[in-house]
Amino acid sequence: MAFYKIALLIIVAATIVEGQRPFYAGSRPIGYPEIVQNEDLLSNRFGVDEPVPLEARGDRNLVYRLKQLPEDNQPFWYLNWRQYDEARRQPQFWPQRPSFFNQNNGRK
């Protein structure tokens, strides 16, 4: 009988612990994106290595049409797409504020 009580206690404890984070939230911490380092996986299968802005969503015809427009009529994201890509490659992270409840000041 004691075995069943211990097993029940372990099952209840495991259920409570697993319930703290929803199953659809994943196992990684929130706020840190996964960055693909290997660009060979993302290369074009037709052999064209000309970079395209992310906002164009792979539409090279759109990029060619935007190149033909005068600079005054080109969209802002197209004019500054290299700066946007550089900013995406080097994201900024700020340290999180320490929680008041986690600090152990010797009080019990």
Image (cartoon, rainbow, N blue to C red):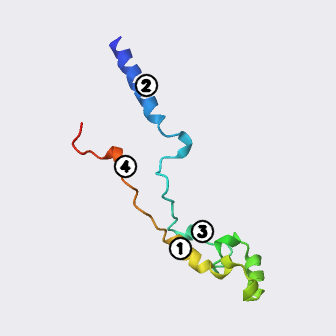
Q: Residue furthest left?
A: 106
The CA distance from mark 3 to mark 2 is 45 Å
Contact? badges 4 and 1 (CB < 8 Å): no
Which residue: 70% across, 72% down? 56
The residue that label 4 is drawn on is: 99
Q: Amino acid at mark 2?
A: Val
Residue 69 % position (x, y)? 77, 86
Badge nearest the viewer, 2 or 1: 1
Label 2: few (<14), some (14–19) or many (≥20) C-alpha neighbours in 10 Å: few
The residue that label 2 is drawn on is: 12
Judge by depth and name the residue closer to the eye, 28 or 79: 79
The CA distance from mark 4 to mark 3 is 40 Å
Badge nearest the viewer, 4 or 2: 4
Q: Amino acid at mark 3?
A: Leu
Which residue: 48% across, 47% down? 27
The CA distance from mark 2 to mark 1 is 46 Å
Residue 99 versus residue 2 in the image, above or below: below
